[in-house]
Amino acid sequence: MKPINVGLLGIGTVGGGTFNVLKRNEEEITRRAGRPIRITTVADKNLELARSVTGGGVKLTDDAFAVVADPEIDIVVELIGGYGVAKDLVLKAIDNGKHVVTANKALLAVHGNEIFAAAQKKGVMVAFEAAVAGGIPIIKALREGLTANRIQWLAGIINGTTNFILSEMRDKGLPFAEVLKEAQALGYAEADPTFDIEGVDAAHKATIMSAMAFGIPMQFDKAYIEGITKLESADITYAEQLGYRIKLLGISRKRDNGVELRVHPTLIPEKRLIANVEGAMNAVLVQGDAVGATLYYGKGAGAEPTASAVIADLVDVTRLHTADPEHRVPHLAFQPDQVQDIAVLPIEEVLTSYYLRMRVEDKPGVLADITRILADSDISIDAMIQKEPAEGEAQTDIIMLTHQTVEKNANAAIARIEALPVVCGKVTRLRLENLQ
């Protein structure tokens, strides 16, 4: 059969991996797809880099818009990233009747509603397995494998940089700033790691998964986002003593009054499989009403793991290239006219448990005052550590785990606790999820 011609936009780490894996496994991929898939044109501002990766034999250009306008190109693979020119290129490719494969989670989380509507109108596909958790086929699982289920919640370690940092902080007892430098030296963190360590990257991915799990529009602007920059080694140690580990989780949960969509450091019981995902690895835990809990684990980044997802999308698009658009799997799992505009709940309405650490004066009655305030806010205590003060010190730490409560109740109680004259400074508060 006639080969499928692919235009590749961007030949950096993932683009280079995609080109090399597609070439190396060409025969196997052709057997699976039913026809050859060939990258015939590569667009990149760095033509010298493109030439060194491709070794010749393909058309090279620094004009990506020429690629999306080329009538000979069947599928455009967008690996440029960002919100700007990538959006223009994707929309122009769709307008020209071309299918699109992208790894751009930021673009989809922010502009996905517009992009999928345009693709639906033109009868083309936008595939994005590589946009979430690298080589883990979580998009395929949500879109097809779990179709029979009402998804109840999902929780994911979906940023390798932060997971590496938290693993190193726990293993070595080092402060955040020192481990961040190590992560940058090893190439796990960018020179500007803001999107990773502040939770933005994870929130992009959680937004996409939430839309697919619950049949709602992309609502990145409603997500609650909290990174790991303020996390202290002491809290990691105390969490360990209580039988928990701290991970940066992207969480989305269906509630009667809306959907929770949040990213923040989270205590997880150490016996849970997801609590033992270490280093730069990713994992996503999905709870369905029929299947129960399912865990998806693997490399969330890197040239060839992400290329694996890009090429899987290329094969899917190739198989369905000539299919009636109405018979294709919907972009976001649900039929477009069945997407529901369910509210994303503000963080104040989130229901969860809490870890609280308070630095207090070592005086009689302090614990009684704190527990009374929690009781007034209908917050019950699940576990507690009260440390003996070090020799010569008049202050100590009290650490508490609470049962579930609404966040606004926790906020009110914390404000009253901080106002006590025996409490020294701010209360450290982390959320806790049992993930059962």
Image: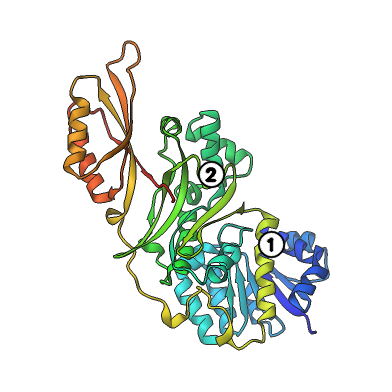
On residue 31, the disc is none
Q: Is residue 2 left or right of residue 123?
A: right
Element at badge 1? helix
Which amino acid, mark 1? Ser
Is 195 rendered above or below residue 3?
above
Residue 163 visible in this rendered orientation of the protein: yes
Q: Residues within 10 Å of mark 2 (few under 14, many from 20)?
A: many
Picture residue at 66% right of the left edge, 83% below the top: 321
x 65%, y 59%: residue: 306
Q: Is residue 46 visible?
A: no
Q: Quadrant of residue 124?
A: bottom right
* Mark 1 and mark 2: Cα distance apart in space: 22 Å
Q: Position of residue 244 (x, y in %)?
A: 45, 38
Compare residues 413 and 120 and report the one nearer the observer: 413
Q: Is residue 315 above or below residue 370?
A: below
Image side of residue 87 versus residue 379, left or right: right
Give the percent coordinates (x, y) of residue 275: 51, 43
Please state the horizontal and vertical placement of residue 242, each as a whole percent of the image: 41, 33
Nearer to me, 412 or 58? 412
Residue 278, by quadrant, is: top right
Q: Amino acid at mark 2?
A: Asn
In the depicted view, which residue is nearer to us: 432 or 51? 432
Question: Residue 144 occupies which quadrant of the picture?
Answer: bottom right
Reading the image, the residue beneath label 2 is 163
The tag earlier along the polypeptide, 1 or 2, is 2
Question: Quick one: 19 or 371, which is closer to the camera?
Answer: 371
The residue carrying pointer 1 sits among few (fewer than 14), some (14 to 19) or many (20 or more) residues within 10 Å by Cα, namely many
* Residue that label 1 marks: 308
